Amino acid sequence: MFSKKHKIITFGEILGRLSPPNHLRFSQANSLEVIYGGGEFNVAASLANYGIRAQFISAVPDNAIGDCVIQSVRGRNVGAKYILRQGKRLGLYFLEHGASGRNSAVVYDRENSAMSEVAPGQFDWDTIFSGATGFHWSGITPALSQSAADTCLEAVKAASERGLTISTDLNYRSKLWKYGKQPKDVMPALLKYSNIILADVDTAMFMLGKAKINPDYSKEDEVKAQFDKIMELLPNVHTIGMTFRNSVNASHQRIGGLLYKNKQLYRARINEISPVVDRVGTGDAFMGGLLYGLIAYKEDLQKAVAFATSACVIKHTIFGDVNRASKQEVIDFMESDGSALVDR
């Protein structure tokens, strides 16, 4: 079984998410719901749902809140053995859920978090990568601090030296790059080790310090040409995934997906999602689904992108950061017309 053969390591920050219940505004809330999640952990949790061994690498404070994080990670069947216990605080973000024409709002409170204070030399990559086949990171980690960026570079170099498949969700967050560097100053050195990336063309070009292009994604030749340019800039990249999103409003989304590999462009169908329960983590659900799809459907890449897109669609209907859909639920949706009849 490929689930025993494959083991994927993910590296990043896990956060406490604090949200007013029932779509209340911050100013209306007398209580906040607390859950734990973060882009790289969300990917690991999806992979574990599908039967892939996953190990999450991070740093959390050595206190009761850190204990809650460890319990949350293990509760999703993700390994937590190598999570560092250090620092005084867990990064937080406050989320106000939007509805209809009112957008969601996020306020970050993650300065001086345990993960932002990691430094090269703290992680034993020889031990962590033993038996691993893949390593996943995102653009969020190097946005936290210079030391986090340096540690991420140490990790991707170690993963590359050991022949792991390296995947990256570019995940640009403008509110995070506050330590004097911009993505173009940091990301090219990291991305040159990547083999699989999740990004639209403009985000990739921006992070590589190139001019934005804004291609017409309905024109296959144009999209392929732009993906080829990215691969020329990043010669180790052989696979590009991308979610295709049309936001009608906060409660109504149209979601599709693209996959480019071996000079071939694969498209997943457009899915209507209304109402949206929780949009947070939907890109991570696509990423986790894509990594699984590239393993399970390596001879049928149309199915690979369909699986990733279906996982993303289902996540929109699930509260919280983590996609709790099983592999069979994703397959059933992928093979259906999306009408969501009662399973009797």
Image (tube, rainbow, N blue to C red):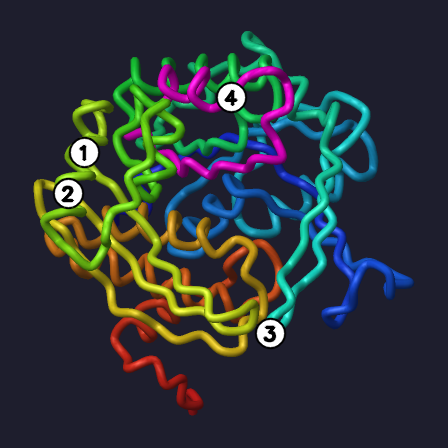
User: x, y (%) of residue 248?
Assistant: 47, 70
Return the disc, 3 or 4, that comes first in the chain's sequence: 3
Q: Is residue 176 magenta-colored?
A: yes
CB under 8 Å between discs 3 and 2: no
Return the disc, 4 or 2, that comes first in the chain's sequence: 4
Q: Which residue is mark 3?
A: 100
The label shown at residue 182 is 4
Return the disc, 1 or 2, that comes first in the chain's sequence: 1
**Numbered label tally:** 4
* Distance of label 3 from label 4 (alpha carbons): 33 Å
The nearer-to-camera label among 1 and 4 is 4
Q: Amino acid at mark 4?
A: Gln
Q: Residue placed at 60% from the left, 12% from the top?
A: 119
* Distance of label 1 from label 4 (alpha carbons): 25 Å
Return the disc, 1 or 3, that comes first in the chain's sequence: 3
Return the disc, 1 or 4, that comes first in the chain's sequence: 4
325 lies above or below 131: below
Return the disc, 3 or 2, that comes first in the chain's sequence: 3
Going by the image, does 117 lie left or right of 168?
Answer: right
SS assignment at label 4: loop
